[in-house]
């Protein structure tokens, strides 16, 4: 069974581009530690070259076909330092890892759902980089970036499809990944690698995003655009910046980025070693409404959040089945919620009463009921909570009635109109079941496709805001000016 491994207590190991050693960086980020140097891979390349020459000499191969292999030039490492996939495969085999072509029949399941895997290797134009899952989250460990870039599950699938359609060679890595590099993070032997926390990685990419603008890349040299369709659909500038930065490939036509001194200083202060290439990864787009908490944290981050997000699958499924059974029971039997609750309470009351009386007659213990009592502190807390909600409601109502907040008026009006329409279409029980169904489906779907949904919602909100500004300028302002003029005339 495949093991993802836990990399140094949840830290992310990242290497920034040094010369043309992207293959070294790729292997080490797959393993999440500085396991190999350029000399180690060069030794593996030399070993492969020797075996290939020996096979050509022993086999019945014509001299013209074997000429290239018998020459002094290596076929597994170029003069510029680029290594072949066979070298990377040989290095990962040391750690009992298999490298499999993404388009092979063995990888069919990974093509359908890449999230089932743990690591991918991508190659194009002499550039290698790794996409790796660490502690359940996906990151792009491209050495051209100052820090790992977080990828949501939906964004991962779209990214893989785009790379594949643009001619990238993609390989998946399977096996038992190393759990931890056996030295402290401060003792990195190569000098261009560092462990960073996910929070530090996000801060670094965001800092680079605020201090740099997207660079223009020569399309005739760079090759196909893996995000062209997404760029045409999305208007969010942060997303465009992240996409533009991800197009910088380590080839002969790679684009050089002029690094801002502020960004450079920030990265150094965060403990990340920068290479002379000066690349700085654009941060991913911020969450919707500039929130900093994840969906799991919004729901409390505990058992309730696990149930809502289907991390406690059995419990969530049980709640849905009970709710569905109750809904079908009420719909088929003709019971209403009030009559059903009254019948249950009546039956329970009769049973307990008869139990208590019979226990007294037969000298048996009474029903084991706890003392039903509300403490004064509990009542005060509940009263304070209700009072706060009521005061907030009254304050909002007063602002709307006095015309102080036009936006709030339209929001409340829209909500009340929606409730009125929905209430007229269904009964309370069906509404409750539908609400529960929405609660147990929408959050988990949003968590899975968060980046995609946020991009479209931001676009809709932006256009809605523009329409509101036009409406406000053409109608509301004119009405207010007309009222003011009438008051002045009086």
Image (cartoon, rainbow, N blue to C red):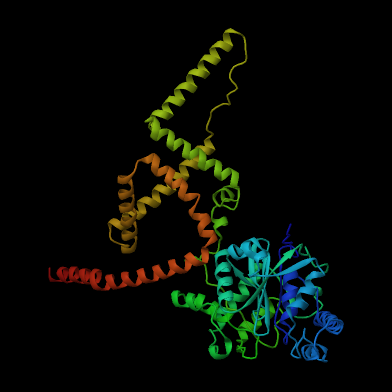
Q: Is residue 388 left or right of residue 358?
A: left
Residue placed furthest toward the left:
490
> Residue 353 placed where, x, y %?
51, 16
Task: Tell how many labels.
Answer: 0
Q: State whether residue 175 is above or below residue 65.
A: above
Can residue 400 be spotted in the picture? yes
Q: State whether residue 227 is above or below residue 75.
A: above
Q: Quadrant of the N terminus?
A: bottom right
Q: Is residue 132 left or right of residue 356?
A: right
> Residue 139 placed where, x, y %?
64, 69
Q: Measuring 76% from the left and 77% from the top, which residue is drawn there? A: 86
Q: Is residue 87 left or right of residue 359?
A: right
Q: Measuring 50% from the left and 40% from the top, which residue is drawn there? A: 380
Q: State whether residue 258 is above or below residue 346.
A: below
- Kindly indicate the quadrant of the structure image that contains residue 99: bottom right
- Kindly indicate the quadrant of the structure image that contains residue 478: bottom left
Q: Nearer the viewer, residue 372 or 18?
A: 18
Q: Measuring 78% from the left and 90% from the top, which residue is drawn there? A: 68
Q: Is residue 317 left or right of residue 199?
A: left
Q: Quadrant of the C terminus?
A: bottom left
Q: Measuring 62% from the left and 9% from the top, which residue is drawn there? A: 363
Q: Nearer the viewer, residue 167 or 457?
A: 167
> Residue 131 placed where, x, y %?
66, 71
Q: Nearer the viewer, residue 97 or 384?
A: 97
> Residue 232 placed where, x, y %?
45, 77
Can residue 34 be spotted in the picture? no
Q: Nearer the viewer, residue 487 or 218?
A: 218
């Amino acid at each position: 069974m495949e093991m993802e491994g836990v990399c140094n207590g949840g830290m992310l190991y990242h290497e920034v581009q040094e010369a043309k050693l992207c293959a070294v960086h790729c292997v080490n980020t797959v393993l999440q530690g500085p396991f190999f140097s350029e000399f180690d891979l060069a030794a593996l390349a030399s070993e492969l070259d020797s075996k290939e020459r020996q096979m050509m000499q022993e086999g019945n191969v014509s001299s013209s076909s074997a000429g290239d292999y018998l020459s002094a030039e290596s076929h597994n490492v170029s003069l510029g330092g680029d290594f072949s996939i066979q070298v990377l495969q040989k290095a990962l085999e040391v750690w009992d890892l298999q490298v499999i072509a993404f388009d092979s029949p063995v990888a069919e399941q990974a093509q359908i759902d890449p999230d089932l895997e743990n690591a991918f290797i991508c190659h194009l134009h002499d550039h290698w980089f790794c996409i790796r899952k660490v502690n359940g989250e996906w990151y792009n460990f491209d050495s051209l970036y100052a820090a790992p870039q977080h990828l949501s599950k939906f964004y991962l699938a779209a990214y893989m499809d785009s790379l594949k359609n643009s001619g990238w060679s993609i390989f998946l890595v399977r096996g038992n990944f190393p759990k931890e590099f056996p030295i402290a993070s401060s003792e990195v032997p190569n000098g261009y690698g560092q462990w960073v926390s996910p929070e530090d990685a996000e801060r670094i990419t965001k800092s680079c995003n605020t201090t740099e603008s997207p660079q223009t890349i020569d399309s005739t040299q760079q090759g196909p655009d893996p995000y062209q369709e997404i760029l045409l659909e999305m208007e969010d500038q942060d997303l465009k910046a992240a996409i533009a930065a991800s197009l910088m490939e380590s080839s002969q036509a790679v684009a050089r980025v002029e690094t801002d001194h502020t960004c450079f200083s920030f990265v150094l202060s965060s403990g990340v070693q920068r290479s002379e290439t000066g690349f700085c990864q654009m941060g991913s787009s911020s969450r919707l409404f500039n929130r900093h908490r994840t969906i799991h944290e919004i729901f409390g981050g505990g058992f309730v959040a696990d149930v809502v997000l289907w991390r406690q699958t059995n419990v969530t499924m049980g709640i849905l089945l009970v709710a569905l059974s109750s809904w079908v029971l009420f719909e088929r039997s003709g019971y209403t919620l009030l009559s059903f609750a009254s019948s249950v309470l009546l039956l329970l009351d009769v049973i307990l009463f008869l139990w208590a009386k019979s226990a007294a007659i037969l000298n048996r213990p009474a029903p084991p009921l706890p003392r039903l009592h509300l403490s004064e502190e509990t009542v005060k807390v509940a009263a304070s909570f209700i009072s706060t909600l009521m005061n907030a409601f009254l304050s909002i109502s007063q602002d709307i009635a006095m015309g102080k907040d036009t936006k709030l008026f339209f929001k409340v009006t829209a909500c009340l109109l929606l409730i009125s329409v929905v209430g007229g279409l269904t009964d309370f029980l069906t509404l409750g079941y539908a609400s529960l169904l929405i609660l147990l489906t929408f959050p988990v779907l949003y968590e899975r496709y968060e980046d995609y949904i946020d991009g479209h919602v931001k676009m809709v909100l932006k256009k809605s805001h523009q329409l509101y500004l036009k409406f406000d300028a053409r109608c509301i302002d004119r009405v207010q000016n007309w009222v003011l003029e009438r008051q002045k005339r009086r």
